[in-house]
Amino acid sequence: MRKNLFSRQSPRLINKTLKYRSALYVVMMLVFWIVYKFFDPLSLESATKNSSAQFFSAITAPFYGMSSPRSHQKVAVVTINDLTLKRFDADLPLSYQRQVFVLRQILEADPAAIYVDFRMAYEHTDESLTQFQSILDEAKSKHIPIFFARGEEGHDQIDLPAPLTGVESYSNALETSSAYPLMFEEEGGEKTEKSQANAAFDVYRSLCTSTWSGQCGVFREDDFHSPMIIQWGLHVDPDQTQVTSLDNSPRNTCAVPFTGGILCRSIVQSFTLGFRAFWGSSRDYEVGHAYYPLTIGAQQLNERGRGTPPGSPPLSHLLKGRAVFYGTDIRDQHDDTVIPFLGRVPNVVLHAMAFDNLVTYGSRYFQEPPEHELGRGFSFGTAEVCELALWLIFTGWMAFKFYYSHPQIPAGHGTRLQRGLLRKSRDFLSLPLFVSAIIPACFCVALAVFDLSHLPSLRNGIDETLLYVCLFLLLLGTLSLLRLSARRAEAEETAPEDDESEAEKAEKLRLGFWAHLALLTSLTGIVFALNELFLHWPNADWVGFILLWLAVGESCESTGFVLTFVNFFSRRSQDHTRKHTPNPESLSQ
Amino acid sequence: MKKILSLGLLCGLILASPIRAATTTTINGVFEKTVHAFSETYAPLGQIPASELMNQPVVGIDENRGLLKVQTARGIVLIAGAAVTTTKAAAAPRETACSYIATLSASSTGSSAGFADNCKPSGH
């Protein structure tokens, strides 16, 4: 029908219509991106982000901290949990006398720092906060930084009463964007001597500017303004087995690092967990994971470890030299956060994990891309700019193909360019596989060399290397599928059928289903590797973008979302043009 | 002879009493205002004020449940050892009990009430 319509029209009118359709296509694609990105209809974008965050947590968690000799060793959590309350014959809030008793046990172990995640904004009616003065004095004499939680920033939080006023620190959990804030802007532009910080960063900053100054490298506070995207690990501290049993859940079969068989290798775990998360069965996996940081119940501090001989030191000795986060580990206190793939985690563990990320990555921690203020409450992120740029390039290419692939468009510069690109890509794909595989091989080797040369320890080097081998195999597989698609298209072009429709000709130019899927998977793999090595942005954003691209791939078909709109508007326009423009055939008559 | 024996006994008593007082463990601190107490047959006695326990002698440890036996005005009561501090010098640490500390499901279904739990006996 459309073919007949075009055949009756003059080349000038066809050219005009196609240009109109191409421009409409670009505008519609832009509208599609804006609606998808900013208006989030039916939570399509946020739902995609959430599910892809599960997937990326599953594939990255087995690798976290495995190559860092400092991860695990510098942090610990002491908790008041249900068993603690039972043993102490107490309930929350604990008496100050009890808190002081626990804090003294922690202090006696010579930790590097202490963060108390109990908000003591108001004094108990029958006790005075001055009881904590002895703890503050002892910490000061031992040069141990100590902080007390002040609550969440931004809710007109009052200062803690004396003597805790000078040692307060915010205790914000994750923001709505799933990022963990490190620092807070001063209100009203008033610069204080020390900028306000969140729990993990306050502890890290105090250590890096004092006792750990030699271990933190060059510490510049300005490098830590962006909120952190916390990376979670699946392994436990090797000392955790002294404290608790890991037999509660099959999730912990491989929890102790560098133990277990080949099934416990990071690479194997990454694939198996990633496979499950990809198909949405991650929910089964979110219960029973032991926490990444060493976690000890407060009632266990004066007990010796499991399986240790009589006369062994108490478990509190494990806190020596670590930053200790002390808080509640009780579900009903609502002081917890849901972490993708892991489930519900107490916020005191969240602060400790953020601190471990700072120890592991330093200023190169995973973070939200920088935001640029446009004024009047408008801002845009660098990630959005990158996405939009890539989106426009892709849209431009689609519109270019759409316009010049029409058989009645006269051969011009655009057609030559398109044919040149097609010929070059087919020339490349017709090379022997081992020749065309040199480019992806060089790419993967370069990434692997860069990664391994920047690892502080090569303990997990084999698994890290295998990751790049897998990436190379993925690219090789995609290349093979693209070669098959190119050969098929070439064979069909040599035997053209005169009566085939415009849609059938366009179909020949499209990739096969598997080649298209492999191309997207390869693209995801490449972006993931580059992001892990260089950008350190949230991975979930990228997956959303790739899925968006997949959706647009669908739109190449006449039933696709964007093209349906384009066809609709285009037909309305053609009807309008036919009514107001005389038909060339009728003119000749 | 009797006088000498009586004198010796008296001296012995005088000398022994401070030693006995020094070796008797007493409660010198209570963390909360009240403490849960149980009878020797584990019948709950409710909560008793901390003041009733202060400076009272610890007469033993209940081996079955690890509770302290304390002599009070209302007789011997059992209380949690970690609820109080005593004059006894710190003993060598005992082995910690088997427990789990782990994540919970994002929804409440299929998960335990708390993040920490005692190990279940085998076969359960």
Image: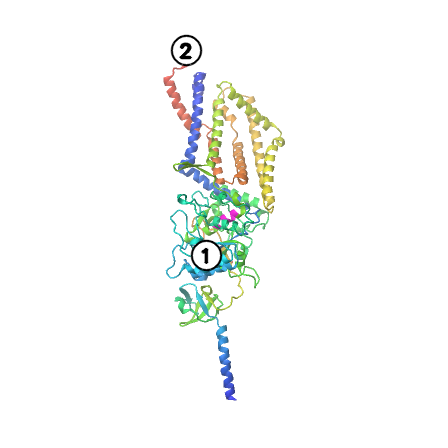
Disc 1 versus disc 2: nearer the observer: 1
Residue A521, labelled with which disc?
none
Residue furthest to the top: A589
Nearer the N terminus, badge 1 or badge 2? 1
Question: Which residue carries the number 2 mark?
Answer: A588
* Residue A171 image position (x, y, % from top left): 44, 50
Q: What secondary structure predominates along the stretch shown in magenta?
A: helix
Residue A310, by quadrant, is: bottom right
The chain letter under disc 2 is A
Q: Does the magenta portion include A353?
A: yes
Is residue B113 inside the magenta stretch?
no
Compute the Cα span from label 1 to label 2: 91 Å
Q: Position of residue A540 (x, y in %)?
A: 48, 40
Say which element carries label 2.
helix
- Which residue is located at x 46 percent, y 30 percent? A555
| Magenta stretch bounds | A351-358
Which residue reaches farthest bottom? Answer: B1
Chain of the residue under label 1:
A
* Residue of label 1: A81
* Crowd class of label 1 (few under 14; some 14 to 19; many from 20; radius 10 Å): many
On the image, the x and y values in percent for residue A251 come to 52, 50
Q: Is residue A122 above or below residue A279?
A: below
- Secondary structure of the residue carrying tag 1 is loop
